[in-house]
Image (cartoon, rainbow, N blue to C red):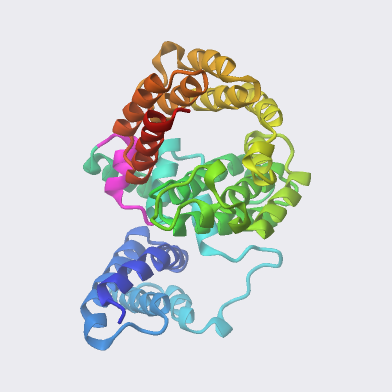
Amino acid sequence: MIDAAEAVAVAGAEAYPRIVATLIRVTGDWTLAEDCAQEALATALERWPRDGVPANPGGWLLTAARNRALDVLRRATVERRRLRDLALLTDPERAPAEPEGDVVDDRLRLIFTCCHPALALEARVALTLRTVAGVPTADIARAFLVTESTMTRRITRAKTKIATAGIPYRVPTGAALVERLPGVLAVLYLLFTRGYDADGEPAFAAEAIRLARLLDQLMPAQPEAAGLLALFLLHDSRRAARRDAGGNLLTLDEQDRSRWDHAAIAEGRSLLDRAGHGPYALQARIAACHATAPTAADTDWPAIAHWYDQLARLRPTPVIRLNRAVAHGFASGPAAGLALLAEARAGGALDGYPPALAAEAEFTARGGDPARAAALFRAAAALVNSAAERTALVKRADGLTVGGP
């Protein structure tokens, strides 16, 4: 039997962003949309244990939120047009037609609104994570290293600025569309990462893929839109093989490649034909090298190192330089990897960063010092937040202690 509270949580995670986006479009009121979505969830928690989980939980929540919004708008005597538009949510056949060629998706409109250049970059990311992805404000605050109350004020100020500045709730066109694209891509990248991380929510990754696909349909001449979608598909193709029967993370060389989604790999590779050589496209080409290798031993590490060289020239961030060091370490040997790793860590940018410690541990092991490598793997394990990653790192350390590199 389905637990009603669990059903509310699952349906809410999937439907909440859709409900908020839809209500914002028809009411123009961000606070009302979020309040009504929250009240719909509260009502479900009250009624579903008593009445049973509905056949279409997401539709039930949208109807409940819509009805609550209708009540509020009626009491406020809002103009009839908004009431009429809101009422049409229950009858898609009567909904007004979108302009020809428009991508019909409220969340896509909402992302472009959240990513408007009038907002500070951190505000764009935070607002999109909160409103589109439904990420709790407390989680966003931790990611930005601020208190929850501080993040709440930032998000509130961003919504207020959208309202007072008259920022339109639509997908822009022409030059404005090209100008706004990098900010939207960055938000989708963060959304996918949150879903694909070891302890991430898979629904976030699926949503990022869906919205990236919509973006690519909207902007087929924009190579980075194709590159981002290719990157998502190539990474997500491995999802089913990333864990063993016990739920433990598996490295690429441990995964059963027959379980990879080869249709997604083929689609990702086909997108590379028009993806260009921007940052996301380069990352997608790296992912394609892994995805197309029949075995781990067949991985084309020199090609991966080449693509990382290009990516580091475009975006010389500490993390990209770290990944470049790893690629060269596998392509040219552990000494080369350790040398480039030392360069990436210069200045302390990667101090206390678990992947940097893990990379040092890997090349130290391959260089013939398993005891030191095991200690480094354990140090990395002590710093990670993910239980799955911690278990994998400790397992690697234990393997070195018992049987060598």
Q: Nearer the viewer, residue 140 or 338?
A: 338
At x 37%, y 29%, the residue is: 401
| Relative image position of residue 194 (x, y in whole percent) | 43, 47
Q: Quadrant of the N terminus?
A: bottom left
Label tally: 0
Residue 135 is one of the magenta-drawn residues: yes
Q: Nearer the viewer, residue 134 or 394?
A: 394
Q: Please identify the dominant SS of the magenta region.
A: helix
Q: Residue furthest bottom?
A: 51
| Relative image position of residue 310 (x, y in whole percent) | 68, 25
Q: Nearer the viewer, residue 265 or 372?
A: 372
Residue range highlighted in magenta: 134-146
Question: As drawn, is 273 to the left or to the right of 330?
Answer: right
Location of residue 103 by image quarter: bottom right
At x 60%, y 44%, the residue is: 181
At x 57%, y 55%, the residue is: 209
| Relative image position of residue 38 (x, y in whole percent) | 29, 66
